[in-house]
Every structure is written in C-alpha cells, then in structure tokens.
Amino acid sequence: MAKKNPEPTILPRERAFLVGVELFQQRTLLPLEDSLTELALLADTSGLDVVGELTQKLDRPHVKTYIGPGKVDELKALVEETLSQVIIFDDELSPRHQRELQEILGNNVRVLDRTALILDIFAQHAHTSEGMLQVELAQYEYYLPRLTGQWTHLERQAGGGGGRAGSTGGVGLRGPGETQLEVDKRAIRKRIAHLKKELEKVRAHRMRYRAQRKRSRIPTVALVGYTNAGKSTLLNRIARSEVYVADQLFATLDPTTRRVELSGGYQALFTDTVGFIQKLPTTLVEAFHATLEEIAEADLLLHVVDISHPNAMNQAEAVQETLDKIEAHHIPVVTALNKVDRLRDPESAREAASRFSKAAAISAVDGTGVKDLLRLIQEELYETYTPIRVKLPYQQGALISLFHEAGQVEYVEHGRGGVLMQGRIPGRLVAQFTNWQVPNDHREITEEV
C-alpha cells in the first residue's frame, strides 16, 4: 500500500501583545482605539495573532521606558499570562526605549514598534529587485542606531536584494581594539552606501523612462490612497488587467503601470503605487524615494478613498500629508470615493463627494460610477485649461513647442534671452512650467528675458 505524502507542516502564528499611548501634546489623525485596531490589522498582515492590548495616557513619553514603570510591570504580567512572544508599540520607540524595555521584559519576548512591524510587512511583500533594495535600505537605516551587539531580530526580518541583513560575511578581520559591534556597524554603513548607489541607478532609469513617456505626450495618472483603499482593484477595472489584489494592508508595493483608453480616442498611463498609512515611517519615505517620484512627476493624481471606512476623512488627510512630504501637492487631483457597494446609505458618499473639488462615488468591484470617474479624469487631462504666464529661455525649446501644440497661446513676446508666453494650458501640464512662471503684472519683461 502506497504511503500518503505527509501534509506540509504549518508553523503556529506567534502571539502578539499591543501597547498604545495617548500623548496629550501629540496631534494624531486617529483616536487611540482606532489606531490600535489598525495596528492589529498590521500585525495580522505580518502573520501574528493579537492576544491583548494595553493603553496609557501620558503628558510625554517616559524617559527610559516610554510607558510608566507601573505600566511596564503590568505589561510584563500580562505578557506572561497571555504567553505572548512579541510586544508591539503603536509609536516608534527610540533606541534607548527599546533597549530598556527589552532588558526589563526579558529575552523570551521581542519588543517591536509600529515602524519595525511595517518594515517586516514590506519585506514580505516586496517582490521586484527594486522593492527589495528599498526595503533593505529602510531596514538597515532603522536598525543601525538600535544595534546592541546581538541583532538576531535583524537577521530574521531582513528583506532580500543581494545580501541578508545580519550577515558579516566578507567584512574582514577586526582592527586593533575594535569590537564586534563596531565591525557590524561599519559593515552596515558600507551596505547602506551600496544600496543608495543601486537605488540611484534605479532613480536614473526611472527618470529616463519618464522622459520617454513625456515625449510620447501620453499623460500619466498616479493612483494614491491609504493602504487597502482599493487602488489595485480599480486599476484592474479600468485597465482590464490582473494586478495582484488582496484584502490586506500593503498587498502591493511595486508600482504597476497600465495604458487606459479614454473616450474620444484619448489615452492615459495609470500607475498603481504603494499605499500610505498614518505614522508612515520616515525611513520608508526616504527609501522609497525613487518609487514615490512616480507620484511627484505625474500629470494627475487619482486619490482613492475607502468611503466605507469609519475614518475615511482622517485617512484622506494622512494621504495628503504624505503628498506634501514628497512635494506633490501642486499636482491636480481627482478623488474616487470607493467601496460605495459596502454602504448602507449610498447617499452619504455623494455628500462626502461635495467636500472635494472633483470627485466621483464608485465601486471598483461592481463598476458603479467608474464611467463618471473616467469622464472627470479625461476632462482634467484634456479639457480643463489653466491660465498661465511664463518666461521661457530659448534653451527650453521643448516647452515652447509644447505650449504652442497643447495650449491656447494669447500673447508671445520674444526678448534677448528667451520668450514671454501667456495663455492657457491643460492642467496636467502646469507642473512642467512651474519653474518658469511669472506673475501677471510682471513688467520690463523684454529687458529681463
């Protein structure tokens, strides 16, 4: 009798305990309870089971342990009672906080914070070489000041990208009096420098690719939104494509671009980008700079909002804050109020739409309102013209030609060093002329140009 193949062994999920602190002087987008609910979703996405939580209100973080000494004792007892293996704080801990807590709570549990948890999720979900490089850089920059000689947590959580974090292979012999910790830090700094060089190559490649797209004169639309707002589902709907979709946070990290046919023979390139989140780690914003440039260089932003979420407006504000960080606030925006199919009262979505200048209530799942959304996008890309007055040097011949070809020229004045042009151009092109704009009451233009 043939033996049956044994079932694959599924390792049990680790048990996680959450800690949230409400600081009276700290402005937050979400109430503490809602922020912990989001942290629990992040933990689940990372493969952890949340077994409890502890909260505290403070004027400011405790200098040694972030939470007060009494709460640390309470936390230790609860962790032992629930057999927790991981403790996750909802805010970023300083290296000192993390060291002190780890020493008090013991080596049987790992002390993490929201930033480390997000980094772990990104490491799991990065599939392209670029994504892996970006995650690895963010991890090293986060963990470097937290090294204490034993950094097995970094070995476990590191992403890919040509070398595992925690490896000291190839470092060489230590110098006189140099500790292993110093060797480790020197190796990490060397790795960080290498990763930055590699990502600079990625950035240069993207710049060449974007320049090629601009020459094709096909406008680009970047989908932005809070994580799990439904951007990938919407891209699949409007582009009839099969971008990976999952009902979890940060399901996709790597940007995906699809060509979309609009009515009247018009076209646009739609790019799905990484989802945003409140308290997005600065290390991630910096590491994903090459990818986020896809947003900052777009002709139009399509902001996807999960209107069925109880904190939809707070999430929209978190997205806007991140757009401000990457200096994309000047780009025109169309808002898609997604997931109306989940609302008991669809009228509430139309009321929410009134808060935005250009918005459509839609369902990316069943297609409700998508035609209206595409019409708004087409109007913004091809039919909405913005008054503008620019002083262009003759070296900017491509922009001078673009104004003539795509815009409505009302006035031209040639000077010694350039040309003054006034008229109207499609809103999607305004960003390209921003550096050359002059006020409408500008005088002595002939002498200046």
Image (tube, rainbow, N blue to C red):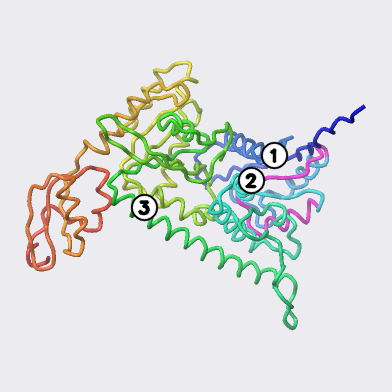
Describe the element under mark 1 as helix, strand or loop.
Answer: loop
* Three-letter code for the amino acid on which mark 1 is drawn: Gly
Q: Name which residue lies at 47% across and 62% down.
A: 201
Q: Is residue 95 above or below residue 332?
A: below
Q: Determine the CA span between mark 1 and mark 3.
A: 37 Å
Relative side of 80 to 298, left or right: right
The residue at which mark 3 appears reads as: 210
* Three-letter code for the amino acid on which mark 3 is drawn: Arg
Give the mark nearest the N terminus, 3 or 2: 2
Relative side of 273 to 79, left or right: left
Q: Which residues are magenta?
A: 81-106
Relative side of 443 to 292, left or right: left
Q: Name which residue lies at 65% across and 53% down.
A: 62
The percent position of residue 198, horizontal first and vertical second, equals: 52, 63
The percent position of residue 301, horizontal first and vertical second, equals: 36, 41
Give the mark nearest the N terminus, 1 or 3: 1
Q: Nearer the viewer, mark 1 or mark 3?
A: 3
